Image (cartoon, rainbow, N blue to C red):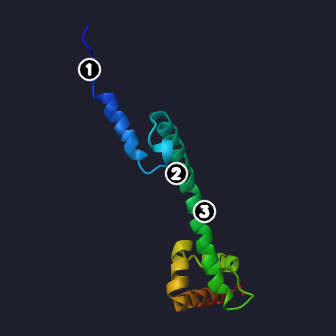
Amino acid sequence: MTRIRRGYIARRRRTKIRLFASNFRGALSRLTRTIIQQKIRALFSAHQDRGSQKSNFRRLWITRINAVIREWGVSYSYSRLIHDLYKARLLLNRKILSQIAILNRDCLYTISNEIMGYKKSVGLI
């Protein structure tokens, strides 16, 4: 009986999986079964970390804004600034506020002064 030559489809699938795991260490980049298992774990972790990355950046932005605000005085805080922004209907998200706080502090001072002027004109103070 003659030898049957296998097709290239399974080999192509395995090489594609190996290319994904080419920078893994040890058997995780050589053995097909462990490569598949490690690929599942890696993609699961990537999916999980995309959510935590959003919260980490939000935490960083809040810390930056709060650090700049606390320089003005102890009485003024991040939560009070955000509350006053919502009351004055200034729609600035935390990412933009943190960039303003880092790059142009005078602009953030101006924004807070505008909020105070709005609160006085409406009669909230």
User: Where is 76 relative to 49, above or below?
Assistant: below
| Residue occupying image coordinates x 64% and y 88% | 116
Q: CA distance from mark 3 to mark 2?
A: 15 Å
User: Where is 25 relative to 74, above or below?
Assistant: above
Front residue of this view, candidates 16 and 109: 16
Front residue of this view, candidates 20 and 58: 20
Residue 30: x percent and y percent?
A: 44, 40
SS for tag 2?
Answer: helix
Mark 3 or mark 2: which is in front? 2
Q: Quadrant of residue 82?
A: bottom right
Question: What amino acid is labelled 1 in the image?
Answer: Arg
Front residue of this view, candidates 113 and 102: 102
Q: Name the image quarter holding the N terminus.
A: top left
Front residue of this view, candidates 64 and 28: 28
Q: Earlier in the sequence, mark 1 or mark 3?
A: 1
Q: Earlier in the sequence, mark 3 or mark 2?
A: 2
Question: What amino acid is labelled 2 in the image?
Answer: Ala
Q: Earlier in the sequence, mark 2 or mark 1?
A: 1
| Residue occupying image coordinates x 28% and y 29% | 8
Residue assigned mark 1: 5
Whether pointer 3 and pointer 2 mark residues with C-beta atoms closer than 8 Å, the reply is no
Mark 2 or mark 1: which is in front? 1
Q: Which mark is residue 46?
A: 2
Mark 1 or mark 3: which is in front? 1
Question: Crowding near pointer 3: few (<14 within 10 Å), some, many (20+)?
Answer: few
Residue 93 seen in the figure? no
| Residue occupying image coordinates x 34% and y 29% | 10
Q: Which mark is residue 55?
A: 3
Question: What amino acid is labelled 3 in the image?
Answer: Ser
Residue 122: x percent and y percent?
A: 65, 85
